[in-house]
Amino acid sequence: MFKLRDYQVENSRKGCEILRQHKLLALMFECRVGKTLTALETARLYGAKSVLFLTKKKAMASIQSDYDALAPGYVIDIINHESMHKALGDYDFVVVDECHTYSAFPKPSARYKAFKERFSRLPIILVSATFTPENFSQIYHQFNLSDASPFREGNFYQWTKNYVNVRQRVLPQGTINDYTDGIEEKIMPMIEPYTLRFTQEQAGFIVQLHEHFCYVPMPRKLKDIAECLMRDAVVEGRTGTISAENAAALQQKVHQLHSGTILLDEVPDEKRQALVLSDAKARFIADNWPTEKLVIFYQFKAELLAIQSVLGDRITTDLKEFQNSNKSCAFQVVSGREGVDLSLGQIIVFYNISHSAVSYFQARDRLTTSSRRESHIYWLFSCFDQEPGLEKEIYDVVMSKKKYTVNHFRKGKCLNPKFKSGLSNSTKPKDFIPSKLSKQIRLASPTSY
């Protein structure tokens, strides 16, 4: 018979008390400590009869497995957020997993509006390890999914008058209001009565996280193309064109190039063509980890082509095959970070880096288990003539955002103040260039630029 861990039983009891008092509960639990089981058991204790569980598509099978094991006695519909319109039951309880997907501001997302119209009156559990991955202004729309929200302002703009330091930003197209500076000291006391926190350390996951930078030499021609694109906004080649119609597109194209791939512009009657211009990073992986069971996160789809071309049958993109074989796996960061158990992997390799702090925190925790004492993450950063490429700059920006997530678990913020963040003090990144650093650099496919 399935049995919850003691801390899951206790957290479920506490969560039910908060729900009975406020009709809204925020489970700010770190990854891998049992958020799903706690939410399911809390719904049982509350007396739910028909539960809607909204989550990510990749997490649905895992949640169904937890529900089957727990057998809580109520009916459940497990639906991904994008398919909310398929939720047709007569629900009396809602769990919103990965609720930070509703955090867009200043205007609410269409997803938020759809939820608000149908389910805001019901008892709600909000679940995420990253409620504020980038700033505290992201709290508003998540808590306002419920009519029981502690924020009584009519909309986000009215809310900012009390809880945000609104600043002016000057852009090429004009001056805009910047609402990203949510005031932590005002917001946190408001949501505290609705919140339950729990860390990996409290759960007994004493894991030291080691991060390593691996600088991979890349063909100089990639940087030359990127510099031409930044100067002219368009680069003409014999097989296609690379253009950037705005600053966001330029940033993405340069990011792709520095890591060895590019997506050419569309031409009449043809789709965009993804090219692998260099497989140096993939060969770096093959040279330095020839036998390890790896979890590889990539950013752009063409990077998977490079990984597969070098590692071949050693790589799978199927979670079940990864879990039931000796194969390593490769996932796009945005799809592999949430709701998947990758703990059988020995190390994580980031082929490239996302701009999202959510991606960093959730992807790195995919290896965490109660028995693992150390985890290693290797970042593959491009290097041109001994100078770091764009990925290192992106990493520094992402790290500057981490305080918003970590703040929820720092000492003094937890319900039990003797516990601190699950991050150890020995997790500072260090430079790492393996002795097998590849000397030969070739283009995976001929470039015409």
Image (cartoon, rainbow, N blue to C red):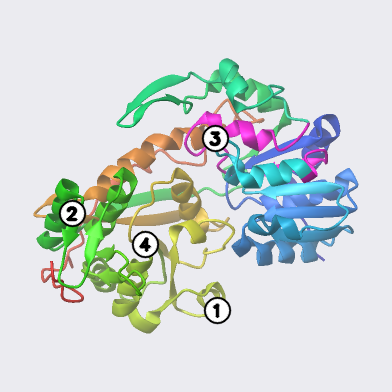
For badge 3, the amino acid type reads Phe
Label 3: element kind: loop
What amino acid is labelled 1 in the image? Asn
Q: CA distance from mark 2 to mark 3?
A: 32 Å
Distance in Å between CA atoms under marks 2 and 1: 41 Å
Residue 52 percent across, percent down from the top left: 78, 54
Residue on which disc 2 sits: 226
Query: What whole-number distance in Å separates the C-alpha atoms at marks 1 and 4?
Result: 26 Å
Residue at 63% in and 50% down: 33
Are the residues tagged 1 and 3 within 8 Å (C-beta)? no
The residue under label 1 is 324
> In this orientation, which residue lies closer to the viewer: 7 or 40?
40
Indicate the amino acid at tag 4: Phe
Q: Position of residue 272 (x, y in %)?
A: 34, 69
Which residue is labeled 4 in the image? 300
- Residue 382 sits above or below residue 156 on the image: below
